[in-house]
Image: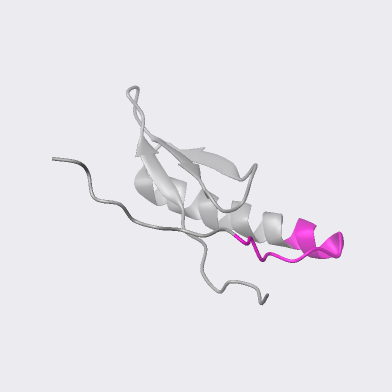
Amino acid sequence: MSEPTDIEFVFEPQDDGGYSVYAPDLPGLHTEGDTLDEAVANAEEALALYVEGLREDGRSVGTGIVRRRFSIPA
């Protein structure tokens, strides 16, 4: 399996402000930011560090995750 070229991130607004960020396909990759711009910058940095760590360990970024969309029941 080849490595993905894009990784999806989820930016969840927090009740007390800011954003919690995670990548569903990369277990343990979490970050946050006080603003959306800061959260995006932190996500990019976290991704780079995550991938660097995987590669140093001789592991691939390939996740093997399968995604499907389902309609919300009426």
Residue 26, percent from left and from top? 61, 51
User: In terms of image quadrants, where is residue 59?
Assistant: bottom right
Residue at the image position 22 percent from the left and 44 percent from the top: 72
Magenta: main secondary structure: loop
Task: State left or right for residue 43 relative to residue 71.
Answer: right
Number of labels in the image equals: 0
Residue 40, percent from left and from top? 44, 53
Seen as rendered, the residue at the extreme left is 74
Residue 23, percent from left and from top? 53, 50
The correct choice, above or below, for 28 with respect to 4 in the image is: above
Residue at the image position 55 percent from the left and 41 percent from the top: 31
Quadrant where the N terminus is found in the figure: bottom right
Q: How is the image coloured?
A: one colour
The boundaries of the magenta stretch are: 52-64
Residue at the image position 66 percent from the left and 66 percent from the top: 62
Task: State left or right for residue 69 relative to residue 21.
Answer: left
Seen as rendered, the residue at the extreme top is 16
The magenta stretch spans residue 6: no
Residue at the image position 57 percent from the left and 58 percent from the top: 65
Residue 55, percent from left and from top? 80, 65
Seen as rendered, the residue at the extreme right is 57
The magenta stretch spans residue 56: yes
The correct choice, above or below, for 52 with respect to 35 in the image is: below
User: In terms of image quadrants, where is residue 16?
Assistant: top left
User: In terms of image quadrants, where is residue 14?
Assistant: top left
Seen as rendered, the residue at the extreme front is 73
